[in-house]
Image (cartoon, rainbow, N blue to C red):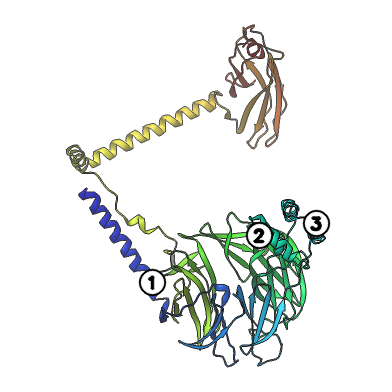
Amino acid sequence: EVEVAGAASLGHQALEAHREREEARSRKVWLHAWHDPVAGLKAFSSCVRLADLNGDGDCKLLVAGMDRKLRVYKGTSLLSENILLDEPVGMAVFYPEARRGTTPSVAIASGPQVFIYRNLRPYYKFTLPELHVEAREAAAWGAAATGGSPAVELRAKLAEAREAGVALSLQSRELLAIDDPNVAEAFVEAHKGEVIVRRTVVTCIETLKKDHEDADACSMLVLGTEGGQVHILEPAGTAISCTVQLPSPPVFLAVSGLHAVDYRVVAACRDGHLYTVKNGVLSDTVIELEAMPSALLRMDKLIHVATVGAVVHSYHLKGKKTSTLFLPKPAVCMEVLELSKTRVARGILLGLTSGELRLYAGTALVATLRMGEPICAIRFGPYGREEGTLLVVSASGALTVKMLQRKAQLEGNGNGTGPPPEQDVPLSIPKKTKLYVEQTQREREQATSMHRIFQRDLCKLRLTTARSYVKIITDGQGPLSFSGGASLRITAQVQGLGPRFRIRLSIQNTGRQAVSDIAATFRCNPSLYKFKQSLIRLPVLVPGVLLRVDGEVECIDPSGGADQVRVLLCSDKSALPVLSAIVNMPLSEALLSEG
């Protein structure tokens, strides 16, 4: 027990040392700037953005929280707080005009609407178009409105339509969720005269540049809906420019390219697949994931997708997988680290469910931050006058600001993906016995002689093996033969159930010279087998050409016995066979029929 406790203590010390090394390495990358434990933020990465709202180069932090408040931070202070009409599901910052010096607009998706703010004031509300109502659902409600169908029959018709794969409206789904017949009857009476409307909601939102790659260039909103559509809006955000139907509702979007030139929209959907929309057309490139996606981002021509299976896959835009990262815990948020002004640096930031924040350069781990609680949202970019700022929103609502060290090495090192820290934990080795001590002492004293004996026995073993191998190939006892500069190979296969069999021989010359005057002969037990032709003359064996020869044999044993048949390749120039193979014959059909 004392030894086990000591080993556990050493293991704990090794883990602590590894954690200290990670913290020291992270301090060389990140500089702690600010931490507000009582910020009270409840938002995910899709609702956290950085934007230059006034066009003065001073970027601010925008957080659309689940408490229906839009907060704007400048530095360490809360600049403004606006009330939202509904809980947000995503936020995007875009430029509706192509003129220089314009300020961006903020689009907040909530339910079926997208609220557009200019100068942090409500400007326009875009509503998703209604979806088509299926004829079966409309006919069922029409029959209920005329009084000919009670609530029980209406529920039965709607349930049947749902089982048939018909997408129902919210009104029908609410009716099917009611179990009390009286409540269901009252619900039908209250809604049977209403017009059936099938609406959808926004699930994700991103932006697409129109014709320039500049940071303040004109851009367009890209919306993913619960109905499986991807809408690309006009730059003003007041009308739909293009709509693409996906097989499943998208939950994450990754947009690349220019709308006027060439663009792609990669959608991670609820069915565990990645679909690509290229220039307004659904592409045939479909990527199937082994687990549901939890985060998605684009970096250059690569798409990185994190799954709930604690892995991050990287794919080219054309669908080819390039690499895979294995994580200790699943990633809940992912962000691109990209610098272009002061220096050029790129990486991937991953927020794990365990509270770790990892920075990867390619597949190499650069630094690890331990936040102490689960991470809900991360965002990296210019904040204030600083180009590289990391903002983290924790599960408790705390806001943490980290700044990237200007001399930080982001190339990654070979130790980033090295052995795990558990490798430093010592093993629980048993106590040394008296016999062990005597043997170790003997090895120390007679190390030279023991090594010489080992080397001598090893040389003898190698010599015996080589002699046996040479004897086999020179006597024709194996499936390979080397004679006269030629190399032959033979394989045999038995066909048939009996009593008649066919032995198919495959003979190949793997050498560089042709071989002639070779005959194949069969040797067997004459009381069991009888060959139709026991000697077969072979043509010239050309190097690299496979020759197939069939030998027909019949089992003449009444009891259907089985034995070995030996195949020999003989030459007129040698008394010994050139090559041989042993074929294990199966039981004949006669014996099987008796059983």
Image location (x, y in percent) of residue 408:
44, 77
Q: Residue at x 36, y 71 (%)?
A: 23
The answer to whether residue 415 shows anywhere in this view is yes
Q: Is residue 271 left or right of residue 17?
A: right
Write down the quadrant of residue 324 in the picture.
bottom right
Kind of element beneath mark 2: helix
Q: Is residue 216 above or below residue 110?
A: below
Taking depth in this image into account, of 484 and 162 the one nearest to the observer is 162
Q: Residues within 10 Å of mark 2 (few under 14, many from 20)?
A: few
Q: Is residue 471 above or below residue 544?
A: above
Q: Residue at x 54, y 69 (%)?
A: 334
Q: Is residue 455 above or below residue 302?
A: above
Image location (x, y in percent) of residue 392:
47, 75
Q: Is residue 49 above or below residue 572?
A: below
The mark nearer the N terminus, 1 or 3, is 1
Taking depth in this image into account, of 334 and 185 the one nearest to the observer is 185
Q: Are marks 2 and 1 in contact (CB under 8 Å)?
A: no
The mark nearer the N terminus, 2 or 1, is 1
| Residue 437's disc number | none
Write down the quadrant of residue 243 in the picture.
bottom right
| Residue 136's disc number | 3
Q: Residue at x 45, y 32 (%)?
A: 466
Disc 2 target residue: 183
User: Which image quarter is the C terminus in?
Assistant: top right
Q: Residues within 10 Å of mark 1 (few under 14, many from 20)?
A: some
Q: Amino acid at mark 1?
A: Arg
Disc 1 target residue: 25
For marks 2 and 1, give the CA distance. 63 Å
Taking depth in this image into account, of 198 and 124 the one nearest to the observer is 198
For marks 3 and 2, give the CA distance. 23 Å
Q: Amino acid at mark 3?
A: Arg
Q: Residues within 10 Å of mark 3 (few under 14, many from 20)?
A: some
